[in-house]
Image (spheres, rainbow, N blue to C red):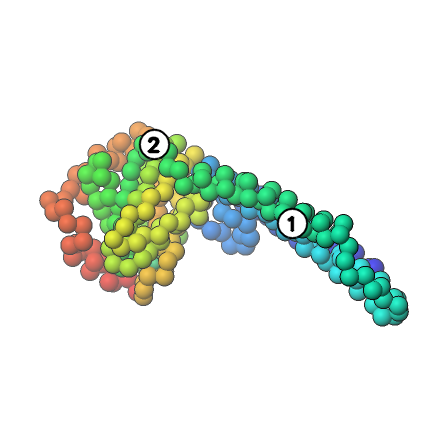
Amino acid sequence: MSVLKRLIAFVVISVVGGASAAWATTADTGQPKPWEIGLQPGATPVMDDIIWFHDFLLWIIAAIALFVLGLLLIVIVRFNARANPVPSRTTHNTFIEVIWTVVPVLILVTIAVPSFRLLFYQLNVPKADVTVKATGKQWFWSYSYPDQKFEFDSLLVQDKDLKPGQPRLLTVDNEMVVPVNKVVKVLTTGADVIHSWAVPSFGVKIDAVPGRINETWFKVEREGTYYGQCSELCGRDHAFMPIVVHVVSEKDYTAWVEQAKKKYASTDDDNNARPTAIAAADGVK
Ligand SMILES: [Cu+2]
């Protein structure tokens, strides 16, 4: 039995160690960190719920795996040919058949209730304070603020141009800026092929499909810079079109909008005809 004890100890240490490592990564950097084995810390209520649901499922599957392992070990030890030379001829047992039907159903219902609650929470976009349209292009994102009437391109910053502290392959020249504690509605579309707008710490991942508009939302509870990446294989430079969302106070946001209106003033409403941006994106290798 000492092997079994060791195995159980290993599983317990792995599960507890894994959970505490996930808790230890609560420092909020909005980006992945070395040796991180849990999800990125949540910055929105939706992501907090996703993390809770993930941990909840982890306990359930760990219990099921241990239970099945225990049954297997009992069978191996007690019902092998040597220990049990005269096998039972039993083929049916109504009680146990009812149990192994009803218990999995109860487990699935226990999972389904919070699962659907979370799904509806994600899908029902509350009344938006700010709307931003993210357009995926080969290979960069354009952000349009329809209510404020400006749009800009957000391109990867090359390694040689990075400033100290800026993460490689995640830094962009023009960040999407939104206010803290406000509902931001994100509309996504694709200009050429399917892209996907994803920010792990927001719990958001939504396809950007040419010819249609998808919508999602987030409400970030802490100021900071949050990073994501295109999450739908979209061609050669798919890995080089990061997403950066800078979450600032309401006051800073208003100031940024004023400045952005001037900086990104465009006389041309055609979003796709932007030769300078496209030439710059082509330089990304
Ligand atoms: Cu992509």
Amino acid at circle 2: Lys
Q: Is residue 204 left or right of residue 177?
A: right
Determine which residue is flagged by label 1. 104
Identify the image quadrant of residue 52: top right
Res 73 → quadrant: bottom right
Q: Is residue 147 left or right of residue 203?
A: left
Q: Name the one closer to the observer, 154 or 68.
A: 68
Q: Position of residue 164 (x, y in %)?
A: 37, 50
The quadrant where ligand 1 appears is bottom left
Of 109 and 179, the residue lying toward us: 109
- Find numbered disc 2 in the image and state the secondary structure of the residue it sits on: loop
Q: Earlier in the sequence, mark 2 or mark 1?
A: 1
Total marks placed: 2
Image quarter of the C terminus? bottom left
In the rendered image, residue 268, in percent from the top left (x then y), is placed at: 12, 47
Q: Is residue 81 above or below residue 187?
A: below
Q: Residue at x 74, y 55 (%)?
A: 8
Q: Nearer the viewer, mark 2 or mark 1?
A: 1
Q: Residue at x 34, y 37 (%)?
A: 184
Residue bearing mark 2: 127
